[in-house]
Amino acid sequence: MMNTSAQRPLVVLDGGAAGPYIMLPLTQVENVRAILDSHDVSYWVDTWAVSLDENPYMTVINISAKFDVDSIQRMIDAANEAE
Amino acid sequence: MATYDEIRDLLARVLKDLDAVHDYYVYTKLAWRTIVQSTQVEGRRLRYLNPITGNEVNENAIAALSQHYVKNYLARSTLEEFVALLEEFMSGLMRVWLAAFPGSLAKKEVRFGVILSARDRDSIIQEVIDAEIHALLYKKVADWFDYLNHTAKLGCPSSEEVGRIAEIKATRDVFVHNKGLANSVYVQKAGQFARFRAGDPVEISEEYHEQSWRLLRKVVQDLAEAALAKS
């Protein structure tokens, strides 16, 4: 799956002990939520969003520390390949 | 009239402080998100140096640290501040109320030394009120509201709201006293509103954080308005 704002692949970031997280455009939140829900991943989405240099608003999906970065990245990538 | 003005000023001050803490939470969180967006999404390079500790981090380390700071440190420190503001409001309201209606303290005993060193009658009353509030704030959250209801009969908050506040206070206590791990004390204090079992790491989700802020703000406002209507 691409980050449509930056035209780069969507990257799962390593939050260390705080768990993985994904920064993504607001418009992609629902798609990623569907992927996470289908794998029973616990997460919550930031209420607030940031826009830099007039670019689209970006927000964050916070993922439970029970999950590791690589497994979440694989889920995202697999969805990307299926697109 | 002095009582009315004091309660009104107390309410305004605590609501302003609650809003300021929430603004701090949101703006700090967004500042970190902006840094992560700038580095991890847009590819900027970044380094921070702390000469005090000698630690230096690059954009990748900052991305990891920022999530820890936001999800853990920031959420817990602002929740602690919410609870501190509730305590400040409760002690302030009780102080104003007991000063205006000291009759409920009629059976309290005063050390003779307090009388000897007192400037006047009001300073003796103030001493008794201070001791009363100090002792009360060490008791259970439910006891705070029982005491206030017994003393001022304000008719709020509801028992459910008291239970939820007790859980918020118990969550705060877990971070202050037990390194963020729920224990039997948490379970006992939180009662039916407990969110975790003993041994579980306690989390403060954004939703919980917001609901806690909204509840404490509402309860402060309800109590002040009920007290204003009676003063």
Image (tube, coloured by chain):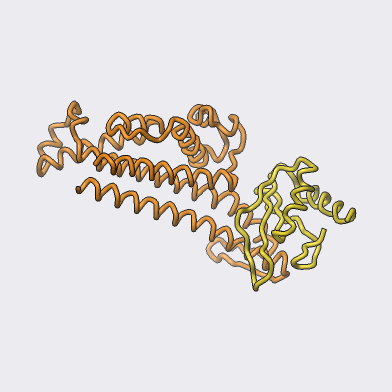
Chain colours: A yellow, B orange
Where is residue A60 drawn, in percent x and y? 67, 56
Residue drawn at (53%, 60%) of the image: B27
Q: Nearer the viewer, residue B45 or B52?
A: B45
Report the residue that reaches farthest toward the front: B229
Where is residue B45 drawn, in percent x and y? 69, 71
Q: Could you say which quadrant of the image residue B44 lies in?
A: bottom right
Q: Nearer the viewer, residue A54 or B52?
A: A54
Q: Is residue A47 above or below residue B118?
A: below
Residue drawn at (24%, 47%) of the image: B4
Is residue A70 found left or right of A14 in the rendered image?
right
Q: Is residue A75 above or below residue B188?
A: below
Q: Is residue A33 above or below residue A51?
A: above
Residue drawn at (61%, 38%) of the image: B201
Q: Could you say which quadrant of the image residue A28 lies in?
A: bottom right
Q: Is residue B78 above or below residue B108?
A: below
Residue drawn at (66%, 58%) of the image: A59
Is residue A51 found left or right of B8 in the rendered image?
right
Q: Could you say which quadrant of the image residue B87 lies in?
A: top left
